[in-house]
Image: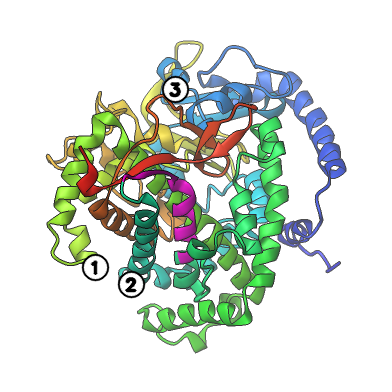
Amino acid sequence: MASIHSLQDLYDQLLLIPITRWHVGGAALAYAVFKLVQQMIIDPYYSPLRELPGPDNVGNILWGHLPQVIDAEGGFMNDEWFAKYGPTFQYRGLFMSRRIATIDPRAISHIVNRSYDFPKPAFIQFSLGRIFGRGILSVDGDDHRRQRKIMNPCFGPAQIRDLMPVFYRKAYELRDIWVDKMGDVGTVLNTHLWLTRTTLDVVGLAGFDYDFDSLQRGETNELVRALMELFSPTSTWVNENPGIGGSLSLILSAGRALGFTTGLLSANSRSHFRANMASDLKDSERMKDSERMKDSERMKDSEVIDQITTMIIAGHETTSTTVAWLLYELSKAENIHMQEKLREELLSVKTDEPTMDELNALPYLDAIIREHLRLNPVVVSTARCADKDDVVPLSIPFVDRNGVEHTEFRMPKEEPVFLPILYMNRDKSIWGEDALEFRPERWLIGDTHLRSGEIPGVFAGVMTFIGGPRACIGYRMALMEMKVLTFVLLRSISFELSDPNLKIERRTTAVVRPVVKKEDGSYETTMPLHLKHIRDRD
């Protein structure tokens, strides 16, 4: 083992150690003893978080309030708590440890815009490291600054414009497959599966010139199979151990995808990815001469692999799942008129491949995408922790148990604060009483939600792509891919619910996937919709 000179070296070495259930059990037991002593003896008298409102009981001695959290829609938070305790409160996590949740705009801005003072909690960094390696999604601090500086030029508007032919190529390939399967009378298809294949093909070609060809070949590629299984709720562990057990299963199974990424992607693909970065860096005003970069500013070979892994796993799953939920939203009986209105706008375009600027100039398409990303984010929460004791300001004061009003709360070092994206995007105090409704018109009639400007999201005043230094680096690519898929598919195909009585559940692993519960009690990831030719609609 390499010598260890810092905590970062220790973290790097821990990532190389295979996790077994004995390791997990031993660590959990030691952590449990420590936390129980802390929470039962020390915490009631000294924790500054005791001032915050929240449930009076501590929940389960082992799980705290996590069962209620996991059972909530989207697998994160119970909206009754926000109604009862306000936008900022504390609840209990594993071994009764205190956790903070907030949707207060000023608190969110304070935390998100100072991302390097509020890194991801250690347990999340470790979990993401197991899934993605040391890519941009899992690293923090100076490593994240360096990686972000190198990769930012790859995701600018000009670079996304160059990718439009790839988006259209795969979108039309998907459309042709669906039209062929529809026959003369239409058919029911698992749209999520096919969209996942499409976005996987796109990210392979766009990122590193690797063709998974999963639209034609399905899951014959080992890496494709591993990726399809990675976030699936159909695995035994996820079904039998929801929540923490499912997360552990996700971490353990991610090693397969990580290994396949390293083994199956050729040296040419890695070189292509590196060449793309070098080309974009040369065009960047900040780095006109990439040859003059210090060694400390370059990416190691292992980091290149980890960026590829991150792009493959995170880049395709979020987009495909978002589009699947959008087609579902437009297939509801009460929203069919929106689908038809959108189709009318799309059919008014005289070219089959409008430019990025032409797509962005379509007002109803833009409103549909914005409203869907607001109401139905597929990543429902994120978490941060303070790297030192801090005071977090609030725009909405809270009253403690003694009746004293507070306009801030003290946040101890390393204490996790959870930012529920789903509930920020649905906050009635920002979006109005119709915040829970899918209403694209809110984006067309002018700014009737002025308080959305208080939310530090990188896009449209919503937190779907987060904000600040850790905002989603690929959000422009995701937006254009969504718009291209919507444009191509809705011009030729109409979508309806396959069975109005079929319950499509939202089940969270890394993203909120659509699932159906089968007769044997297991879950299947699927979004069955009825597809028909436009001319066949009654």
Residue 492 as seen in the image, left or right of residue 130: left
Q: Amino acid at mark 2?
A: Pro
Who is closer to the viewer here, 430 or 37? Answer: 430
Which residue is the site of mark 1? 353
For label 1, the crowd category at 10 Å Cα-Cα, with few meaning under 14, some 14 to 19 and many 20 or more, is some
- Place of residue 536 in the rendered image (x, y in percent of width and height, measured from the top left): 23, 44
3D distance between C-alphas at marks 2 and 1: 8 Å
The front one of 509 and 398 is: 509
Q: Are marks 2 and 3 in contact (CB under 8 Å)?
A: no
Q: Is there a contact, CB below 8 Å, between mark 2 and mark 1?
A: yes
Q: Which mark is residue 79?
A: 3
**Residue 275, image x, y percentages:** 50, 82
Q: Which mark is residue 154?
A: none
Image quarter of residue 394: top left
2 or 3: mark nearer the eye: 2
| Residue ID for mark 2 | 165
Q: Is residue 293 visible?
A: yes
Q: Above or below — where is 180 with respect to 29?
A: below
Q: Residue lying farthest front?
A: 184
- Regarding residue 373, the answer to whether it shows in the image is no
282 versus 95 height, above or below? below
The stretch in magenta equals 185-201
The residue located at (71%, 37%) in the rendering is 236
